[in-house]
Amino acid sequence: MLAIFEEAALAAGRVILDIYQRGFEVETKADQSPVTEADVRAEEVILSHLKAHMPDVPVIAEEQMAAGIEPDISGGRFLLIDPLDGTREFINRNGEFTVNIALIEDGKPVAGIVYAPVVGVAYTGGPDGAAKLTIDQNQQVLSRQPIRVRPVAAPPIAVASRSYLDAETKRYLDELEPCECCTVGSSLKFGLVAEGKADVYPRFGRTMEWDTAAGDAVVRAAGGSVLAADGAPLTYGKRGRRDAADFANGAFFAWGGRDA
């Protein structure tokens, strides 16, 4: 399954990079979030790959949901897709955006990939553990390295959103008093926790399930945890599923190896 995800993500990355290099226009969706041609075309590529290999698994994809396409996921097994996580980073041309694909089973992310085309890095996670992939400019995988979270340091290293560093997150970080806090775009933050370069990623601002599922799968596969504000693992497909708003997450915290 991760091989299917990898193929789909790399194909989407090619489309995204082409648009990134030649230029694009920015539109605004009904929820006031930005969208570009890259978001739409990358999603089309991913959906085509998944339909060919996993035709019976329903897919929740960000741009389809924005268009009112809402598949039935009551069976408990479905795919969550964010074709371009970090659209603002894409628009700002800082390279910190990712392609996110995840499989959910009974509310848990059991497999996922986070791919950053400009950075040339992908993180994967599944039942056999997590890995970091190095990828060249032609979207060819050069290396695969198993990764694992590290025991959380005291004081910890924190990572936070570059574009959504809200007051509540700042307050939490002030209380946590990390020895270092770096800001990074998109789901790359989950990857830094998964590979042991950061200990915690707190998020209080608005996210959707497709924003977090793939990174969550990677962190869990690497031995970490992604917890809601009440301390329980973050869950997916948990709400009424009436429209896109039902897929919103509350506050969460991605942790490294706190029990190590």
Image (cartoon, rainbow, N blue to C red):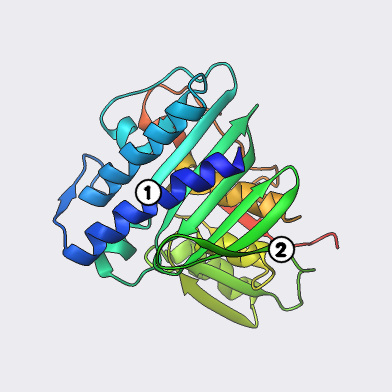
Counting from the top left corner in percent of width and height, residue 60 is at 43, 31
Give the Cα separation between the discs numbered 1 and 2: 24 Å
Q: Residue furthest bottom?
A: 179
Which label belongs to residue 12?
1
For the residue carrying disc 1, how many other residues have a C-alpha within 10 Å: few (<14), some (14-19), or many (20+)?
Answer: many
| Figure quadrant of residue 92 | bottom left
In this picture, residue 129 sits left or right of residue 15: right
Which label belongs to residue 131?
none
Counting from the top left corner in percent of width and height, residue 193 is at 64, 64
In this picture, residue 50 sits left or right of residue 259: left
* Residue in view at x 65 percent, y 73 percent: 197
* Residue in view at x 38 percent, y 46 percent: 83
Q: Amino acid at mark 2?
A: Ile
Note whether 85 is above or below 121 in the view shown.
above
Which label belongs to residue 147?
2
Q: In terms of secondary structure, where does tag 2 sit?
A: strand
Q: Where is the C terminus found, in terms of image quarters?
A: bottom right
In this picture, residue 148 sits left or right of residue 235: right
Counting from the top left corner in percent of width and height, residue 203 is at 52, 57
Q: Amino acid at mark 1?
A: Ala
